[in-house]
């Protein structure tokens, strides 16, 4: 690949990122020119909705386009296992440039800061971090040993003194603690507690945050003197989940059984109000009902039901279904099974949100202690009760 074409692609990428984020400070531009994204990518990328292979040798222009697009460059599918005829899903990537630079801005790493990254992936972000914090100050943990070894080799080859550790980032990495900054590039549903003890008081933890109900954005925590951390959510970002926090629960395999006899009732709450039409409502349901997920079922093959929203706990013990008959938009049939009345819980969380004048996601935050997590509205002193 001639360097001039990658130079042009890099410039176009930085123009696009600068348009999105406002002009990037010179230190970020310098980092992007020093740690060039395409140099961290393997010869095979996975592109498009179906994650088709795109090989550098066969399609050098398409490969370079993918390398500098403002999109994740997917570098591994299905945890590196061959999916055969099955679906492909992304399990590692170089994240989209816009979110990478937005996170670097939010992280605010300075020369001399010790930084821990969780999720090395390609090593691109670790290279950028090394430009910002200084050689020898960045440690990065990757759960996939092959990816970790590849990233370490690329970082060395490009002249970046980053220590890559193969391991579970949920444990952090005590070997180089304490850190001034911890940044995760995989999403968490629960903030791993070792992160709190490995970041010094006043230090920052920045992580994508996700709820089973909805994928939301970023959480920026500041660690205090007591080993707790607190800070706001900010929109929007979608990252792959930390491996150890994935839930493999399937509706018709694990949750709903033929012999279940759910209770029937009706509800005035539209399923679209909490699961499609208003992102603020979706976020609050996700924040308050941390172990509840949902799935839409169009035309479920049931007489008189046009659309059904399924709701279930991640431990598969309780479920609810809410039916739209194609006509009535203010009355929905509800089925609930298990020890928890999940639709009642969704209604209560939604009513709490309405009762507080529909606060947007940017007004919420989270406090994390050694023993638990407490969401809050506007201020850590204003906790939001679990379940609304
Ligand atoms: C979006 S990619 C990382 C992007 C990366 N920072 C880059 O610049 O290329 C997320 C990575 O997190 C890794 N990951 C998932 N769970 C992990 C865990 N428990 N510990 C460490 N890494 C993990 C995945 O294997 C994947 O490589």
Image (cartoon, rainbow, N blue to C red):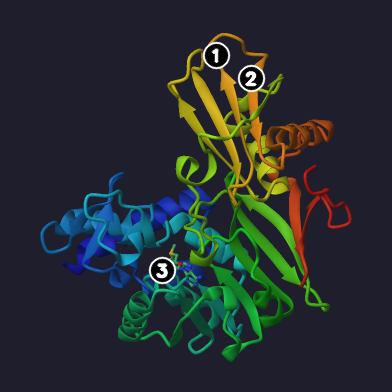
Q: Earlier in the sequence, mark 1 or mark 3?
A: 3
Instruction: Confirm or reject: label 1 Cβ below 8 Å from ligand 1.
Output: no
**Callout 2 secondary element:** strand
Dividing the picture into quarters, in which one does residue 335 lie? top right
Left or right, 69 with respect to 231, comes to left
Q: Residue furthest front?
A: 259
Circle 1 residue: 325
Mark 1: few, some, or many residues within 10 Å (few <14, many ≥20)? some
- The residues tagged by marks 2 and 3 sit, at their Cα atoms, a distance apart of 54 Å
- The residues tagged by marks 1 and 3 sit, at their Cα atoms, a distance apart of 53 Å
Please name the residue shown 68% across and 73% down the image. 193
- Where is residue 69? Give x, y as percent: 33, 53
Q: On the rendered image, what quadrant is the N terminus found in? A: bottom left
- Foreground mark, 1 or 3, reads 1
Instruction: Confirm or reject: label 2 Cβ below 8 Å from ligand 1.
Output: no
Please name the residue shown 17% across and 62% down the image. 56
- Where is residue 371? Give x, y as percent: 78, 69
Circle 2 residue: 333
Q: Earlier in the sequence, mark 2 or mark 3?
A: 3
Mark 2: few, some, or many residues within 10 Å (few <14, many ≥20)? some
Circle 3 residue: 32
Residue 85's disc is none
Q: Residue furthest left?
A: 58
- The residues tagged by marks 2 and 1 sit, at their Cα atoms, a distance apart of 8 Å
**Callout 3 secondary element:** helix
Q: Earlier in the sequence, mark 2 or mark 1?
A: 1
Q: Pointer 2 and pointer 1: residues touching (CB < 8 Å)? A: yes
Dividing the picture into quarters, in which one does residue 278 lie? top right
- Where is residue 41? Give x, y as percent: 29, 68
């Amino acid at each position: 690949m001639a360097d001039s074409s990658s130079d042009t692609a890099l410039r176009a990428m930085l123009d696009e990122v600068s348009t999105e984020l406002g002009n990037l400070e010179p230190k970020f531009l310098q980092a992007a020119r020093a740690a060039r994204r395409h140099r961290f990518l393997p010869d095979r990328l996975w592109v498009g909705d179906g994650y088709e292979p795109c090989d550098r040798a066969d399609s050098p222009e398409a490969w370079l386009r993918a390398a500098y697009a403002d999109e994740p460059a997917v570098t591994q599918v299905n945890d590196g296992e061959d999916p055969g005829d099955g679906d492909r899903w992304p399990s590692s990537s170089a994240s989209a440039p816009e979110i990478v630079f937005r996170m670097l801005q939010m992280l605010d790493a300075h020369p001399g800061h010790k930084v821990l990254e969780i999720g090395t992936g390609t090593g691109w972000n670790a290279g950028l971090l090394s430009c910002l914090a200084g050689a020898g100050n960045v440690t990065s943990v990757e759960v996939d040993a092959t990816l970790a070894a590849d990233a370490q080799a690329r970082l060395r080859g490009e002249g970046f003194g980053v220590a890559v550790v193969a391991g579970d980032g949920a444990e952090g990495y005590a070997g180089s603690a304490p850190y001034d900054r911890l940044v995760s590039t995989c999403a968490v549903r629960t903030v791993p507690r070792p992160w709190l003890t490995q970041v010094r008081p006043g230090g920052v933890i920045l992580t994508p945050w996700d709820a089973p109900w909805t994928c939301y954005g970023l959480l920026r925590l500041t660690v205090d003197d007591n080993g707790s951390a607190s800070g706001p959510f900010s929109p929007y970002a979608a990252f792959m989940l930390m491996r150890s926090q994935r839930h493999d629960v399937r509706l018709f395999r694990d949750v709903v059984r033929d012999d279940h006899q759910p209770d029937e009732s009706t509800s005035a709450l539209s399923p679209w109000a909490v699961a499609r039409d208003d992102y603020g409502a979706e976020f609050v349901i996700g924040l308050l009902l941390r172990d509840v997920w949902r799935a839409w079922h169009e035309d479920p093959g049931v007489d008189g039901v046009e659309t059904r929203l399924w709701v279930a706990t991640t431990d598969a013990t309780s479920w609810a279904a809410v039916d739209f008959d194609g006509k009535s938009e203010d009355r929905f049939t509800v089925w609930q099974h298990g020890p928890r009345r999940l639709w009642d819980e969704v209604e209560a969380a939604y009513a709490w949100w309405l009762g507080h004048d529909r606060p947007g996601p940017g007004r919420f935050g989270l406090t994390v202690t050694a023993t638990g997590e407490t969401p809050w509205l506007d201020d850590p002193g204003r906790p939001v009760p679990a379940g609304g």
